[in-house]
Amino acid sequence: MGGVKTRLARDLGKELAFKVYCKLVDNTFHQILNIPADKRILFSDFQDKKIIPDGLMASTGMQKGKDLGERMHHAFMEGFREGYHHICLIGGDCYEITGAIINEAFDRLRDYDFVIGPANDGGYYLIGMNGLADSLFLNKRFIMVELYDISIIFSGIFLFSSRKV
């Protein structure tokens, strides 16, 4: 079980909101297809590897943590522990995300310790870093939206990692 954001479901109805969400996730999968980096798909509720398009090479796992901050912190921590030096996290439901934006984020991580793709709603659609910064995620208050409880195939985040050469 998973959820679709209340605002989307309220405006479109649960069924249409679910279809829109699935299209957003599918678009994200296709945007990351040719990114020259290792890819990890972290599911929030259950792993359904059947939704990953053919040709997308990605490892999968489950998100860990009780809130968004802990889940992001754990994803970064795990990637750095595995030896990755540049890591970007993105959500699965941002239509504006493109392969060019993700590639630019990795390029910027050569010169900067952190990169953030700001979203119009005050949040962000991408966050990248070269080393773990606990203070960004732990003991922070993240805005939680009310969720409609409906079955969805995916509501996770993606972890893109690039090994330093």
Image (tube, rainbow, N blue to C red):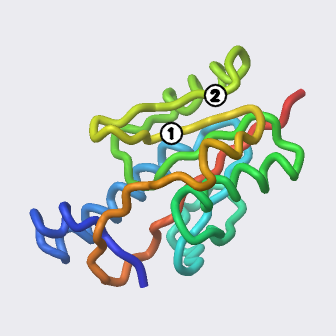
> How many circles with numbers are drawn on the protein?
2
Which quadrant does the N terminus fall into?
bottom left
Extreme top residue here?
Answer: 111
Q: Which residue in the structure is indicated by mark 2?
A: 114
Which residue occupies 66% across, 53% down?
Answer: 73
Within-10-Å neighbours for mark 2: few <14, some 14–19, many 20+? many
Kindly report the distance in space between the C-alpha atoms of the residues bearing marks 2 and 1: 11 Å
Q: Is residue 2 left or right of residue 74?
A: left
| Percent coordinates x, y for residue 102 in the rendering | 55, 33
Q: Amino acid at mark 1?
A: Leu
* SS category of the residue bearing label 1: strand
Which residue occupies 55% across, 75% down?
Answer: 50
Which quadrant does the C terminus fall into?
top right
Instruction: Give the camera-side residue of 99 and 14.
Output: 14
| Percent coordinates x, y for residue 10 in the rendering | 12, 68
Q: Which residue in the structure is indicated by mark 1?
A: 126
Q: Is residue 94 left or right of residue 9?
A: right
Within-10-Å neighbours for mark 1: few <14, some 14–19, many 20+? many
| Image quarter of residue 84 | top right
Which residue occupies 70% across, 14% down?
Answer: 111
User: Eyeballing the image, is 14 above or below 106?
Assistant: below
Nearer to us: label 2 or label 1: 2
* SS category of the residue bearing label 2: strand
